[in-house]
Image (cartoon, rainbow, N blue to C red):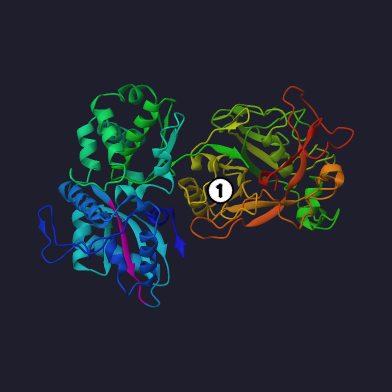
Amino acid sequence: MILSRYMTLLLGIFFSVPAEAVQVGDIDWGELSFEEMSVAQLIKPSVQSLQDFTSKLRDSEALNEFSGNAEQLLIKANTKEWNRALDDPSTTFPYLVCRETSSGESSYEAAKQLIALLKEKEGTDETVSMEPVLNTADTFCVILHTLGRVALRTGLEDPSWIFQPYLNSFKLVKNTWDALYKIDDAKGFRSLDFGLCPSAVQELSNSTLADKALTMLLNATLLKEAIVFWDEDDEDVPNREFWDNIFQYLEQGVCSQVIEERLEWEYDAVGGVLSLTVNGDTLTDSLCSIAVTASVMVLPQVCSISIRAPLKTRNKRVQWLAQSGIEEERPMHDFDIMGEGQVITVSDTGLDTKNCYFNDNDESVIFDRWGGQGNPNHRKVVAYKTSPGDSFDYEYGHGTHVVGTIVGSQGDPYNPNKGMVPGMAPKAKVAFMDLGRGDVLYGAAATTIADMGRPDAKIHSASWGDFPYDTSYTHQAQQFDKYMYENDDFLMILAAGNDGYGDGRGTIGSPATSKNCISVGASHSYGNDLDPGFLGLFGFQKGPNHLADFSSRGPTFDGRNKPDLIAPGKYVLSAGAQPYNPFSCDPNSEPSVGGGKGGVKSMAGTSMA
């Protein structure tokens, strides 16, 4: 089953049953009820997989927020969305469109048929934009952006196609509302990603979308009309009092200062993502942040909303452990496969470029805010993007250790593996993206991260992830998948996470929950890199064939197995950052397990794998 982020959003939102015939806009539905034009139609007995889908909706945790009136509330929400689309004949709106596929029919053939139907109803030859969300042996579903009248006519004239308005609630990635509602913590969420619907990416610019949202936000009446689908006497609306407070804030102008002074917008035209950051730490900032979210959520050009969670960081022995598992046997290096001519991108806390495993006495590293400038002649660091971080790593920092494990080399042309801790690809170079200010990581748009070092770099290593971990298919995970799909020469490698203590199933963290990228867990190491425990009597490390206790593991929220690979990660000796002691190198002896000495450091984590 191919299940994209949009279907993941739907698991746990709404469920509907047949209702009485209603009238929408100027169209009299007559005998047609919402049974034929809502999620309720997903129950059709002939579509077993859609039955299963609806069952998941019914049993979802989110549905528990509703009482016995849930079905009627959904009908009202659907009615409102059809009215919005039909009353605005020039604006396209998003729809979840599904159909049972016949035996032997491919999704490509089903998509072609849908496109032909839409062009016929719309009377145009323009390209129809859609994004597949479900593709099984008997069911095909897409997110489609089209005019309301076109969706209505197509659904009425060919009932084999189900057209379900893409409700505001459908747009919220798993756990988003939970995070939004936790406003008691004055430091709540601060950054959100808004994913644009198919076709909207080409239609809108950053300023256009932001202006639309701000227009809605500054007019509390408009926003209330767009959000509220319930009646005044409805008692089963989830968080009714909460929304009333938000609207009251807007009507009283409480959010004006937040809107004018503390909103930062970032637009990723390639990935189709509008990001918003609210710079503030008061309860008012949190409440107004939710109002901002609502103002963007109601825009028909937006199809997904997710919180950008705070990020958390997640060799000589490693060389032979990974290449053969036989001590000192390095078959890849024996054939001179050491990364020569290759550039690998790493995004992390920072890089000590003066460490002996990266330093070049003849060429300088170019530190550039945007990452566009570099020095391809530097023996190791061909580019260094300083934003959103700084231009260095903290003492024995995470980033320097990770880069050392990958490409570290002292630069001896006759002995690439010279030294205490050469990397896996000692002849390769690195394009580095600094996400750290000290030991704190700051995020960036997925395509901005993936673009770093391109087109020279074909591999990107990211040893960080959401904190706390989120096993769902987040917007960032989907964006990395999309980037890989559109760039066949590119591979993203992600750390699985370090939350697997206690044999913790379901602890894999985003973005390692992606589908096209490779997520890597950690095993024990070997020899002196094993923790002997107290007096050597209570050591729990058993060697490279054993999973590290902290290594996060699947399944993901939607049931996929993760991680994809396991490599030594407890413990690994690699380059150690010494920002106030340039040109640091190998000490006279190895540091203790977990310790640092000179220019090397021992660390544990899936980042090290």
Residue sitting nearer the eye, 165 or 142: 165
Tell whether 498 sits left or right of 236: right
Residue drawn at x 25%, y 42% is 227
Residue sitting nearer the eye, 515 or 289: 289
Q: Which residues are magenta?
A: 94-102
Task: Say which residue label 1 marks.
Answer: 509
Tell whether 496 sits left or right of 166: right
Residue drawn at x 71%, y 30% is 353
Query: Which quadrant of the structure image shows residue 127?
Result: bottom left
Q: Amino acid at mark 1?
A: Gly
Query: Which quadrant of the structure image shows residue 354?
Result: top right
Tell whether 569 sits left or right of 391: right
Residue sitting nearer the eye, 295 or 447: 295
Magenta run includes residue 98: yes
Is residue 268 in sight in this rendering?
Answer: no
From the top left corner, tell me how far across and down residue 602 is, in percent.
Answer: 77, 39
- Secondary element at tag 1: loop
From the top left corner, tell me how far across and down residue 136 is, in percent.
Answer: 42, 68
From the top left corner, tell me how far across and down residue 154 is, in percent.
Answer: 22, 63
Magenta run includes residue 320: no
Question: Against 266, is 108 above or below?
Answer: below
Residue sitting nearer the eye, 112 or 146: 146
Tell whether 502 sits left or right of 121: right
Question: Are there few (<14), some (14-19), or many (20+) residues within 10 Å of tag 1?
Answer: many
Q: Main secondary structure of the magenta part?
A: strand
From the top left corner, tell me how far across and down residue 149 is, in percent.
Answer: 18, 55
Is residue 327 in sight in this rendering?
Answer: yes
